[in-house]
Image: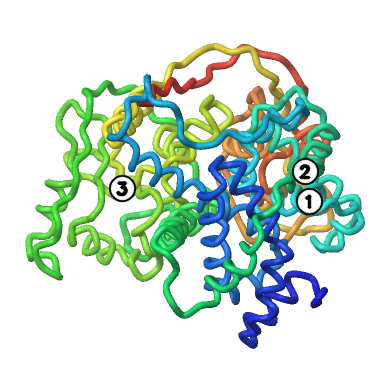
């Protein structure tokens, strides 16, 4: 029997087409994938189809996966979640008109309920939560608890020190605890529950052989499996950049070449202007491959706001004049703006491009942040609802208020989906940090930057590859989102400009690591941070699902 680690087996298959290596890999990981599939779809036969689809995708993406440093178990669990999600959606659509929900007995089989309280709370949300974690956070949890490795082994796999691995695991579990709603459970309880229950179902006899044969066969797989493969690949394509750093650009002047690029740009919340309810406007399909001579007039007609409108969404497919517009500003050669969120600001009867999120999916969380100025820590919404996407360009009236933009986004979500969404602003008692003092930048230890480049880091500053710029208040907003805890700005000069920083921390900083992060910021800026409890405005999502 081939006893090589799974990544070596996958690399052998990717490089040499070694079918025996892939078949052995399937045998080693079949129980992990089948357990995760059964946990989510709750039907043994459907779980078998999902399992086969996962390994078909693995065979097709073998070179890419083999070339990554991420643990294969993490990739398999994430892919199993997306395939299961697609399978359940297809199942729901098929049954939608076949039964009355109030009288029909569910046909899916419920798994035996766990007697472990921690697992009972984690299990319904674990796989989706893992899929939505950042890659390093997911790797830390999978290595430590799914594969039951020691911290030393986790550190070796991740290429970090044992202390850094312990910190990564702590932060990852903190984020997992929040997503799954298991706040009352200790880290030890969560870890023990995952170790004990992550792989409990044994794949049916013959499934490993059938799965390997299906994945390696030149003949297309059965219809159900092929459908799940296609659907899951589409879902994965939309979600793979969810937690990447936002890429944005700022147009400094009207001159086409005057563009400075940043990884993060966050405009000040707009001022108050009331608007009427808006409706989604789908741009008509282009009549020809090129825009007409009067392209600007047509562009303005589509991207204008009515007198009482404050915001509207331009749904794809986009008109050809949009490409012409970007060509005129030399933006098309620099950025492919067919993805992400493009925001146009409407003023004096004309819309002009203002900012772009890069290719980060247009999730509700991103829309609220980028179009309404609502940081993630001020949004109370189900973790999975907030990751739903709403593609298109967004036209916002200059000076529109946060309240009007939020209300308009809610209406757009309701128009584009079968559910109704309302956001209510409420005062909630929350843990916060209060920032005080004057901004006196020195930069991180050992650097000689001019102007000083503030680094958000835990152990040591990283490479300055994600420059950010703004005022003191924007720095504190970024800091708050990194910790998912608001930083109240009581500094001496919150609007002081010329503040530059890099973020070497992937979000979700929790527990004692927040203190270290803030200590490092204080050393570089002179700003102090005090924990407190305050009543704060929070947008609470009320979702009426069909």
Q: Residue drawn 62% across and 29% down?
A: 493
Q: Is residue 434 above or below residue 327?
A: above
Which residue lies most toward the front here? Answer: 205
What residue did someone put label 1 on? Answer: 444
Query: Residue 109 at what x, y percent from top left?
Result: 55, 36
Nearer to the camera, 443 or 529: 529
Q: Is residue 93 visible?
A: yes
Query: Residue 308 at what x, y percent from top left?
Result: 18, 26
Query: Residue 491 at what x, y percent from top left?
Result: 67, 26
Quadrant containing the N terminus is bottom right
Please tell me how crowded label 2 is: few (under 14), some (14-19), or many (20+) other residues with Cα within 10 Å: many
SS class, disc 3: strand
Q: CA distance from mark 2 to mark 3?
A: 40 Å
Q: Nearer the viewer, mark 2 or mark 3?
A: 3
Q: Residue drawn 43% across and 52% down?
A: 250
User: First in sequence: mark 1 or mark 2?
Assistant: 1
What residue did someone put label 3 on? Answer: 392
Quadrant containing the C terminus is top left
Marks 1 and 2 close (CB-CB < 8 Å): yes
The numbered dot on residue 524 is 2
Nearer to the camera, 412 or 82: 82
Q: Is residue 426 above or below residue 421?
A: above
């Amino acid at each position: 029997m081939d006893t090589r680690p799974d990544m070596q087996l996958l690399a052998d298959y990717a490089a040499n087409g070694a079918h025996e290596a892939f078949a052995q890999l399937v045998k080693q990981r079949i129980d992990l994938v089948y357990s995760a599939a059964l946990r989510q779809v709750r039907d043994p036969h459907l779980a078998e189809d999902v399992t086969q689809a996962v390994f078909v995708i693995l065979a097709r993406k073998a070179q890419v996966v083999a070339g990554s440093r991420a643990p294969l178990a993490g990739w398999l669990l994430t892919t199993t979640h997306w395939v299961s999600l697609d399978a359940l959606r297809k199942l729901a659509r098929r049954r939608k008109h076949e039964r009355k929900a109030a009288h029909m007995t569910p046909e899916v089989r419920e798994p035996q309920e766990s007697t472990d309280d921690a697992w009972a709370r984690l299990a319904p949300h674990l796989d989706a939560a893992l899929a939505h974690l950042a890659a390093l956070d997911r790797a830390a949890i999978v290595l430590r608890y799914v594969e039951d490795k020691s911290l030393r082994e986790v550190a070796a796999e991740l290429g970090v020190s044992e202390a850094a691995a312990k910190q990564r695991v702590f932060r990852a579990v903190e984020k997992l605890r929040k997503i799954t709603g298991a706040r009352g459970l200790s880290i030890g309880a969560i870890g023990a529950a995952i170790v004990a229950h992550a792989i409990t179902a044994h794949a049916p006899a013959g499934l490993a052989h059938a799965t390997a044969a299906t994945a390696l066969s030149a003949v297309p797989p059965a219809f159900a499996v092929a459908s799940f493969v296609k659907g899951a690949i589409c879902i994965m394509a939309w979600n793979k950049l969810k937690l990447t750093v936002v890429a944005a650009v700022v147009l400094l002047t009207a001159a086409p070449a005057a563009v400075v690029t940043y990884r993060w740009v966050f405009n000040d919340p707009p001022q108050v202007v009331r608007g009427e309810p808006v409706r989604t406007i789908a741009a008509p399909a282009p009549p020809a491959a090129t825009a007409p001579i009067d392209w600007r007039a047509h562009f303005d007609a589509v991207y204008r706001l009515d007198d009482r409108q404050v915001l509207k969404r331009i749904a794809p497919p986009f008109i050809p004049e949009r490409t012409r517009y970007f060509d005129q500003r030399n933006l098309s050669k620099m950025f492919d703006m067919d993805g992400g969120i493009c925001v146009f600001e409407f003023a004096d009867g004309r819309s002009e491009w203002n900012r772009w999120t890069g290719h980060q999916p247009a999730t509700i969380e991103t829309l609220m942040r980028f179009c309404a100025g609502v940081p993630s820590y001020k949004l109370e919404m189900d973790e999975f609802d907030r990751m739903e996407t709403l593609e298109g360009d967004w036209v916002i009236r200059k000076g529109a208020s946060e309240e009007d933009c939020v209300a308009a986004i809610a209406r757009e979500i309701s128009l584009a989906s079968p559910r109704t969404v309302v956001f209510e602003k409420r005062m909630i008692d929350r843990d916060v940090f209060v920032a005080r003092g004057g901004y006196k930048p020195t930069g991180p230890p050992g650097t000689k930057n001019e102007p000083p480049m503030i680094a958000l880091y835990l152990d040591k500053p990283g490479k300055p590859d994600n420059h950010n710029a703004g005022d003191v208040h924007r720095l504190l907003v970024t800091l708050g989102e990194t910790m998912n805890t608001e930083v109240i700005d009581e500094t001496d000069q919150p609007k002081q400009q010329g503040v530059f920083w890099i973020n070497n921390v992937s979000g979700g900083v929790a527990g004692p690591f927040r203190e270290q992060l803030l200590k490092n910021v204080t050393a570089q800026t002179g700003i102090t941070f005090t924990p407190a409890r305050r009543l704060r405005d929070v947008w609470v999502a009320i979702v009426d699902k069909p």
